[in-house]
Image (tube, rainbow, N blue to C red):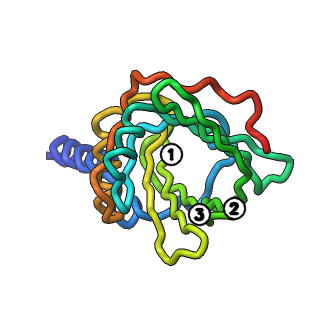
Amino acid sequence: MLAGFAFTFLYLVSLGHSAPLACEDLSRPLDQLNPQHLEGRWTLVAGSNKPPLTPDELKDLRSGSMALYFSNTSETSVYSYTQANRVDDECYYLSYNLSIENSTFTSNLNWYNLTWSILNTSCSDCLVIRWALKKARSASVELFVYLFSRRRDLEQKEMEEFRAQLECLKMPSPKKMDPTKELCPQPITTSN
């Protein structure tokens, strides 16, 4: 009888540890961000946009690859960010500085304001980033939720968690990147 109780208890405990995160957790930004965890290259695995991408934008996204490179500047709350996009055989780089407070980044450029939140995920080598892009002189906000990882391809359970996350955030189904597409060479410097 005692052995049966112990087995049932251990079974229930293991279920609790493997249960997916609840919507409340999946849609909430991280409480604390470890700055050292952020540094280095992150590759886009999948993403969702609201409003959805146009057919041409979707074609460009699917025909290419994207990597983010983060490095800390001399100020502990400022990061240098470089986005490397490959579309067909051309590489495009965009670099700027981001201010961080808790797990939220902000950047104000001439033509738009960009706010990033890094959301909870159970994947240890993943970043789920929610971008809110507000163009100058516009009331509309474009939303992007992208899944980045140190790996090019993720396990099924990690992708299922991302799909659940998008549902919680009321975002369209994800578009998965092709992990065989070549990445752009890492930029020589990631500072402005």
Residue 176: percent from the left, percent from the top?
A: 34, 38
Say whether residue 101 is left or right of residue 130: right
Q: Is residue 153 above or below residue 14?
A: above
Amino acid type, callout 1: Leu
Dot 3 or dot 1: first in sequence order is: 3
Mark 1 nearby-residue class (10 Å; few <14, some 14–19, many ≥20):
many
Q: Which residue is mark 1?
A: 127
Mark 2 nearby-residue class (10 Å; few <14, some 14–19, many ≥20):
few
Dot 3 or dot 2: first in sequence order is: 2
Amino acid type, callout 2: Leu
Q: Which residue is mark 3?
A: 115
Q: Which residue is mark 2?
A: 109
Q: Is residue 39 above or below residue 51?
A: above
Q: Give the SS element for disc 2.
A: loop
Amino acid type, callout 3: Thr
Q: Give the SS element for disc 1.
A: strand
Q: Quadrant of residue 145?
A: bottom left
